[in-house]
Image (cartoon, helix red, strand yellow):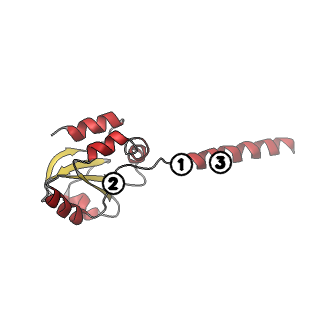
């Protein structure tokens, strides 16, 4: 009986650690919008480009960026130059086809009329890399 108690204790301990790590995510600092037409109107009014970001719950690199890149104060500051919009890949297939999204994470800098100006069709690994890409004009 004792081995069963040890196995059960280890099992539930591991499950607790996995659950806690999965549900703990630092707060993102990027003020994402979810409505592309409204963001384009905001961009025209503010004379800023739109940063369009395609993501999905099942995208591992997207979740990494959510926890490790978009929580960075420097990334949030660099995003001030844009109107950032996050789009769920699975919910907006019309936009996936319009912007020809083939891989994720996918980033596009759009002019205020919604035309792509610059693309990044893969994620970045560090906040520094994201800041460098955002600051490239």
**Along the line of sight, the residue nearer the viewer: 33 or 124:** 33
- Quarter containing the N terminus: top right
User: 114 or 74: nearer the eye?
Assistant: 74
> Taking 106 as reference, is 59 left or right?
right
47 or 39, nearer to the observer: 47
Name the residue beneath numbered marker 2. 31
Q: Earlier in the sequence, mark 2 or mark 3?
A: 3
The mark closer to the camera, 1 or 3, is: 1
Marks 2 and 3 close (CB-CB < 8 Å): no
Closer to the chain start, of discs 1 and 2, is: 1
Distance of mark 2 from mark 3, alpha carbons?
A: 31 Å
Task: Classify residue 3 as left or right of residue 130.
Answer: right
Residue under the point 72% across and 42% down:
10
Mark nearer the viewer, 2 or 3: 2
| Residue 103 at least partly seen | no
Q: Position of residue 17 (x, y in %)?
A: 63, 44
Locate residue 88, reporting x and y percent. 34, 59
Residue at the spot of label 3: 16
Total count of labels: 3
Give the residue number, with chain letter if any, for mark 1. Answer: 24
From the image, state whether disc 1 or disc 2 is nearer to you: 2
Which residue is drawn at the image coordinates 17% and 52% (left, top)?
49
Q: Residue furthest right?
A: 1
For marks 1 and 2, give the CA distance: 20 Å
């Amino acid at each position: 009986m004792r081995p069963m108690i040890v196995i059960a204790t280890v099992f539930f301990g591991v499950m607790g650690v996995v659950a806690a790590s999965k549900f703990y995510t630092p707060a993102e600092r990027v003020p994402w919008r979810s409505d592309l037409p409204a963001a384009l109107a905001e961009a025209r009014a503010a004379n800023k480009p739109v940063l369009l970001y395609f993501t999905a719950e099942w995208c591992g690199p997207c979740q990494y960026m959510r926890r490790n890149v978009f929580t960075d104060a420097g990334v949030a500051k660099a995003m001030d130059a844009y109107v950032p919009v996050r789009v769920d890949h699975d919910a907006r297939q019309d936009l996936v086809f319009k912007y020809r999204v083939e891989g994720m994470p996918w980033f596009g800098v759009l002019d205020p009329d919604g035309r792509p100006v610059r693309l990044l069709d893969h994620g970045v690994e560090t906040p520094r890399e994201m800041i460098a890409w955002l600051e490239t004009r």
